[in-house]
Image (cartoon, coloured by chain):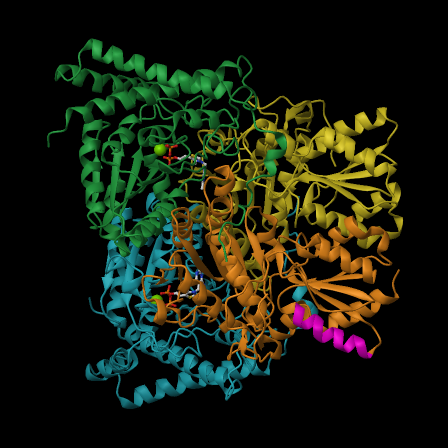
Chain colours: A orange, B yellow, C cyan, D green
Amino acid sequence: MTAKTERKLTTQKAIAEGIALEMRSDDSVFVMGEDIGTYGGIFGATEGLLDEFGEKRVIDTPISETGFIGAAVGAAINGMRPIVELMFVDFFGVCMDQIYNNMAKIHYFSGGNVKVPVVLTTAVGGGYGDAGQHSQTLWGTFAHMPGMKVVVPSNPYDAKGLMIAAIREDNPVVYMFHKGVLGLGWMTPNPRATGEVPEEPYEVPIGKANVVREGTDLTIATIGLSVHKALDAAEQLEEKGISAEVLDLRSLVPLDREGIVASVEKTHRLMVVDEDYHSFGMSGEVITTAIEGAFDYLDAPPVRVTTPDIPIPYSRPLEQWALPSIERIVEASSNLLVAG
Amino acid sequence: MTAKTERKLTTQKAIAEGIALEMRSDDSVFVMGEDIGTYGGIFGATEGLLDEFGEKRVIDTPISETGFIGAAVGAAINGMRPIVELMFVDFFGVCMDQIYNNMAKIHYFSGGNVKVPVVLTTAVGGGYGDAGQHSQTLWGTFAHMPGMKVVVPSNPYDAKGLMIAAIREDNPVVYMFHKGVLGLGWMTPNPRATGEVPEEPYEVPIGKANVVREGTDLTIATIGLSVHKALDAAEQLEEKGISAEVLDLRSLVPLDREGIVASVEKTHRLMVVDEDYHSFGMSGEVITTAIEGAFDYLDAPPVRVTTPDIPIPYSRPLEQWALPSIERIVEASSNLLVAG
Amino acid sequence: MDIPREHLVDMYQTMVKIRRFEERIREIYFADKLPAFDIAAGLIPGEMHLAAGQEPVAVGMSPHLKEGDAITATHRPHHVAIAQGVDLKRMAAEIFGRDTGLGHGKGGHMHLFSVEPNFGCSGIVGEGIPVAVGAAMAFRHHGSDNVALSFFGEGAANQGSFHESLNLAALWNLPVVFVCEDNAYAISVPKTASTAIADNSDRAAAYGIPGVLVGNNDPVAVYEVMGEAIARARRGEGPSLVEIKTDRLWGHFEGDADAYRSDKFKTEMLERDPMVGYAKRLSDEGILNESDIAAIQQAMYDEVEEALQYAQDSPYPEPESALEHVFAERTVTL
Amino acid sequence: MDIPREHLVDMYQTMVKIRRFEERIREIYFADKLPAFDIAAGLIPGEMHLAAGQEPVAVGMSPHLKEGDAITATHRPHHVAIAQGVDLKRMAAEIFGRDTGLGHGKGGHMHLFSVEPNFGCSGIVGEGIPVAVGAAMAFRHHGSDNVALSFFGEGAANQGSFHESLNLAALWNLPVVFVCEDNAYAISVPKTASTAIADNSDRAAAYGIPGVLVGNNDPVAVYEVMGEAIARARRGEGPSLVEIKTDRLWGHFEGDADAYRSDKFKTEMLERDPMVGYAKRLSDEGILNESDIAAIQQAMYDEVEEALQYAQDSPYPEPESALEHVFAERTVTL
Ligand SMILES: Cc1ncc(C[n+]2csc(CCOP(=O)(O)OP(=O)(O)O)c2C)c(N)n1
Ligand SMILES: Cc1ncc(C[n+]2csc(CCOP(=O)(O)OP(=O)(O)O)c2C)c(N)n1
Ligand SMILES: [Mg+2]
Ligand SMILES: [Mg+2]
């Protein structure tokens, strides 16, 4: 890992920089999607790329996700390294076949003869009143199906390093950026969305969780914006004399099972915070991982703070109540500490 | 529940009979899908319906899943009770938006003012060499997203009763029939796919698991064809002096969490057998449910026998190795008994 | 075709109501988000897609509707909902996230559902198109002569659901009118960069149905074309595709800098604002004089204010109510 | 257009090879499944979609191909793969699920992938269409004059991916030839029950590209039309849509009772079997005499037997190898 500089960037700019660096060094990398050119991406992930690389390598598309994501697969098979944007993950339903049945399986079907190096970028997450078709995370859905890696950066440094690693991967990578960690000027300000980012290219390995805060009393395993909430909660818990370790999973595929088990063996208590739907997703998988790997270390049953199995409601009091919050994490932590 | 008769049916015929009974009593019920008319459904689920009810109520469609499933939603909103078939669940990727974002969420978005009584039938499962785009189960994927019930019958009696209950539901129900439990003449013979089915209409409640075999040493929680494999394994285990309780979950949404916890409290050991992909799916959710509800009862960490996180391979030795088998269940049971 | 005076006046009245509603929503949307715009803040959070400029598309249709006709609209739904007569108070309350809203605050401005009139919309491009096909199937089954209309933008015409839905409706000869609102842009992507041909109405040939183009943003032209398309569907003669060239006067969503459209384009667009043109026409033709127009405007302003006031005065739903309405209680009896 | 003799002969030779391959696969498929048919049993399990009767669609294209041209085909891929020159041995071995197969037994007959020639297919209707568009994007980027061809059935032409892909290729003027194999049926559903218009070639107008219909199942007619479409794409003049009326002589998949097609239809279809017609034509025109034909048949039969023997003699992959090739090892260097 290269030495850090003092230079600070938002997560959004760090993503765009990571893409630009790889486009400069590798002519086969190009970007395609809706409003990723002139507009620079609705969430700015491709900001500035059209000006630098031109229309041939930064391609605005029609609203034809099956068409252009399928085209990314075909381009990748034929020597390109496409970065293709699905504007919101909520839209996956119009194009999932190309993603999970085609992009993710061709390498396997070909017995390893054909490679499909596509990076599928997509915005995830709610909390700003965008309602039930523009606020989901759905990483559990993507992680359930084999053949694609799934990464979810929570900060600028990881965002750039994971993007560069994803582009250099010879496998499909679903790169999910949470709108709340991007540091966008038009979203609720988030100090954790800006941070030091080296100017040179570097990689953050895909598949390694990150202990973003050391602790001894419980492990809070989470991902995306919830990492920020867990860190805020951990500060409040410290005042209560509770030492929480916060584990930023950073990728769901591969899932760093060793990292989860190691932390639980240390703290003996586990909470999973997941903005995705409660059931049949990440929270159950992480808890089961701890059970399989550290059953005898657990002093109490693991708990989860998640979004219930309901469509994300629009009205602010409903949405804020439904999504994982600092308050819910603090409360659940306190309960977890007295349990068992 | 009405008294049983001596009459025996295959699961496939039981499904078709359940649909026919409701179509006779409710004119708003109709069936739509690919090859469900003249052909009677690729898996026979709509056999005989065209002859009895005619083209107006049994409608063959083009290969336009987004179009006709979306049309089922529109028809349901406007007073119909459509049964719409997605031939193989593997095809969900071309139409998932209409299923999870539209069919499953409109009732919620409307604050309860609009009802969407659609039954989406679909064939699931592998084991017969149909390869990676025709062998998946994917129930974990559907169960992860809110707003639709998910049922998976394992035998003729449940198949008819769950179909009638699904049609009478005012909610979207995804009705998944496993090809291996249908009793089709062109599939490997399966004695458990034929059984007594009352001729009259009756319902099997959606959301209640079924203890299909009582046992005391461990609980095997599973669904679909794996119920048959678990029962076969239980017979072998009995010879080894191990008493396995087999729990047929029958539906994933709602998931009968009480039923799972009750069985684990009794046996103190849990195995989940899941033909779906290993990670981020049913196996993790069921284990977590037991942990949350019966942590102190567990004598050993629960185990899972699943399909690994790989596309379903075509070649027989690979596929048979990858899918849950009687042998794997027996072996894992024996290990589970000595563990803890 | 001579058009009954009250239709001409109704259309104007509804245009005024729509425009006023959009203007006021815009004011309220920004009021408590500025100076530092925060999309999550204020009385109305989230994305807000307004239809100022597209009023003719909606009002030209409404005089031809009858009770029970179904409409599916898009992420930009207000003009169509108002033109169909969706309860303005409950619609405003939904946009404000209140318990008195159409969806008790669960849906928001992209998810407005009304039973009578029969209206729905969605946040996914092209999602509503097949839903209209299904509504038409239900109408036929019930032997009614109701019609289903689906509105969508020119950007949506490149989504697979457009193709599948038009083929189904044509194949089954269903009473559907597909209405393409061509405002020349899909967010920042101009139609020239998204669509291989000039007019989506020409795509009707791929399904053997009539395709009609309304080349300007004139409510009267829309009235005539939609009248025929709807009548045709009602007569059981099948679906048609109508494309209307219109203008999105403001950004794609509120807060959109709209830098992708040239100043020249935007100036010319504002110069052809249909509100101005249609009012002038009505007075030139002596259908409305200045005081009529003033009276209409006052009446519509009042109605809009009343609805907005109702919304702001309504309570928020209880947080726990988020758990309700995921599933309906059983009503079918054995 | 006069066609080089060797092309006429090559086409016949390839037709014989395809037909023989399909006939033998059919025999082997059933051999150990009968009398009580069990789809899971035998040397070749699972669904088996054979293309007997559709040979002209494939062979008419192949003389116009050059190295590097990409093809995406369907669930019924053998004829196209053979016509492009995919290694018959490794293809047969894949169908037999052997380790020497194109995909080491992981893919099976619906998932045949070859790097050279550049071939792929899939089990999802319409899935391969946009993939060809992307291949064409890569060709343009690399400055090559390669062409991408996508084959799909008339049933697939009602899938959204058809619409989206043709619009993209036309919009970007890409070197793609879209080939619709119209065998009039999608499993049991006749085209009249799936498609609102008679000819999918007319749908080209929705994208402003040429749409050409080959109204019979004649390899020479296909040769001429595909020659022009491929040449056009190679010249950088953009995509076209070619529709070919052809016949699926057997059931949709092996084991299909095929009860949905009338005996009359099936008898007439068999009477127009292109193998017979084309052989007769070649001898009538004095291009091949009886002994030439006999020699060709023998040669092709031998090649097919050799491939099938290779497949049967090849080992099965190790069970644990199921875990390999989910992800590729990193090859890019920092
Ligand atoms: C399937 C899908 N893709 C992308 C989007 C994001 N999106 C929302 S509106 C829009 C532009 C729609 O353009 P058009 O159909 O012309 O309607 P307009 O906004 O111009 O009224 C896009 C791309 C979406 N909501 N759904
Ligand atoms: C998206 C999708 N829907 C349905 C199917 C099931 N299916 C496989 S082949 C087929 C018929 C295809 O007909 P056509 O495109 O005409 O090709 P043909 O079989 O006639 O060669 C169907 C419906 C599928 N594989 N994928
Ligand atoms: Mg538009
Ligand atoms: Mg066909």
Q: Tell me if I can see residue C182 in this picture.
A: yes
Q: Nearer the viewer, residue A273 or B185?
A: A273
Magenta segment, principal secondary structure?
A: helix
Q: Residue furthest top?
A: D291
Q: Nearer the viewer, residue D332 or A164?
A: D332
Count of all numbered marks drawn on residues in the image: 0
- Looking at the rendering, the quadrant in which ligand 4 lies is top left
Q: Which residues are magenta?
A: A227-239
Residue A280 position, x and y percent, is: 67, 52
Residue C14, quarter of the rendered image = bottom left
Vertical side of C180 occupied by B233: above or below: above
Q: Nearer the viewer, residue A335 or A118?
A: A118
Vertical side of C328 occupied by B270: above or below: above
> Is C227 placed left or right of A212 in the picture?
left
Asked whether residue A229 is drawn in magenta, I would say yes
Asked whether residue D20 is drawn in magenta, I would say no
> Is B214 placed left or right of C163 in the picture?
right
Vertical side of D25 occupied by D158: above or below: below
Q: Nearer the viewer, residue D141 or A60?
A: D141
Q: Tell me if I can see residue B125 in this picture.
A: no
Q: Residue at x 42, y 62 (%)?
A: A25
Residue D14 position, x and y percent, is: 29, 23
> Is B30 placed left or right of C140 in the picture?
right
Q: Quadrant of the N terminus of chain D?
A: top left
Q: Residue at x 82, y 36 (%)?
A: B335
Residue C330 position, x and y percent, is: 66, 52
> Is A267 placed left or right of D166 in the picture?
right
